[in-house]
Image (cartoon, helix red, strand yellow):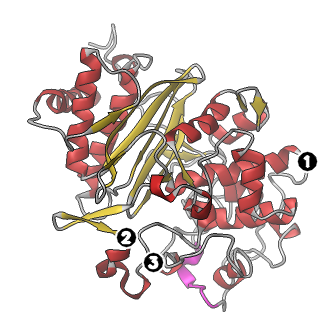
Amino acid sequence: MKKIISIIIMGLLICCSFGVQGVFYEKQSSETTNTSLNDVILNLKISTLLKLFHYPSFSACIIEDNEITWSNSYGYYDLENNKPATINTIYNIASITKTITGTALMQLWEQGLFDLDEDVNKYLPFSLRNPHFPDDSITFRMLLSHSSSLYPETWDYYRFDFSADPPFENYPYPWLEEHLLPGGDTYYPQRWSNTYRPGENCMYANVNFVIIAYLVELISGENLVEYCKEHIFIPLEMYNTSFNLSELDIDNVAVPYHYHDGEYLHINELSYIFGADTPPEKYWRDLHYPTGGVYSTISDLSHFLMAHMSNGFWNGVQILEEDTIEEMHKVQPPGNPDQGTMYHGLAWINFINPLIFNIHISGHGGDSFGSSTMMMYAPSENIGIIHFTNGDRQFEENPVLMGFLSMILLLQLLFKQGGYNFFTHIGLGDNGG
């Protein structure tokens, strides 16, 4: 069965290569020289998939041996003004932000300022406890690996109607206390698991990283925005990266679009989804910026990914030690899969799917209205991939189909450089039959 499914996938890839009559948009902006037949076919595949996704633009790069070996951009990041995307177009990276927030906390851990398995209540001004298991400690490791027993969010958690730059007044604290403790203004009973104790099960919950951001601030004495700027963005020369839109060239920021009923809508036009909480402008400014608020470029974020791929180093600058990198990217206890094939590291996710990868893949994706992003690498192959788009995939279309198409798009980039042998890793190599 495994081989049959693999053959079906390859057939779909071939269909995407040759069964297309046109491309998504007439104009593409290429970053690297793409003159080979393989590059032409790859561009055709990607353009076809983008048309199926209704993505306005798409920027991507492939990293090998600590350098970008391929990059390209497709479509327009601003449809109204026909602005073509490049690898220097600024996108909201959504939940990839968590790897940055987690890196900030691990820098403080390296300084010996806390222990990963220490109760975070030693540092918080309120008692963080699952009300169903009040005697169980919640540790730094549990928060970083989504095993704190906090359930995934309901709609009550999200707040998109902010028009200012962070940091925000009363956030993360005392908002966290009001949200996590029974009786708080934004508390709801489903916030905590009544089945799993802290440390027993991995369940992806954004609010874990709001707590982590607050711990960064308490331990370092700096707000998260400034901490990341001084200790991550500036050292890695990520000069077009920020939590704050006011620090960026707004004319180069990709406009988020949501495709609905045959047209591309700005996020401030989504009252049919958000109602009274519809964002006031067309760019994201989310209350929960530590979990998804960073804006960056493919070029900038490649520096961050290369540092994680190279024992903490980029361009002679080290942001983390080798042992810390190893700890962040390995599967953490309790070691159970979350949502099928996702195994949590510390702020990173390990994608373990023998059918598709069959090797260790570490990374993080992000999805929101008008944003779909991915950053991942295969340590054994020394290949990294980043791609951004200013469209979303999970709200309008069949989620199973869209997830399958996303996988195909990702595999196109993994295969591009030839370093990742698809046939070997799915069991169809020399002895695979």
Which mark is nearer the camera, 1 or 2?
2
User: What's the amino acid at mark 3?
Assistant: Trp
What separation in Å lies between label 1 and label 2 (alpha carbons)? 43 Å
Q: Which badge, 3 or 1, is on the more N-terminal residue?
A: 1
Residue that lies at the very extreme toward the top in this rendered image: 430
Task: Examine the structure image and report whether residue 190 is included in the region drawn in magenta.
Answer: yes
Q: Which residue is mark 3?
A: 155
Q: Is residue 149 visible?
A: no
* Magenta extent: 185-193
Residue that lies at the very extreme toward the right in this rendered image: 112
**Which residue shows up at 41% across the image and 40% down it?**
86
Percent x, y of residue 8: 19, 31
What separation in Å lies between label 2 and label 3 (alpha carbons)? 17 Å
Label 1 Cα crowd, 10 Å radius (few <14 / some 14-19 / many 20+): few
Q: Which residue is mark 2?
A: 267
Percent x, y of residue 143: 68, 59
User: What's the amino acid at mark 1?
Assistant: Gly
Q: Is residue 157 visible?
A: yes
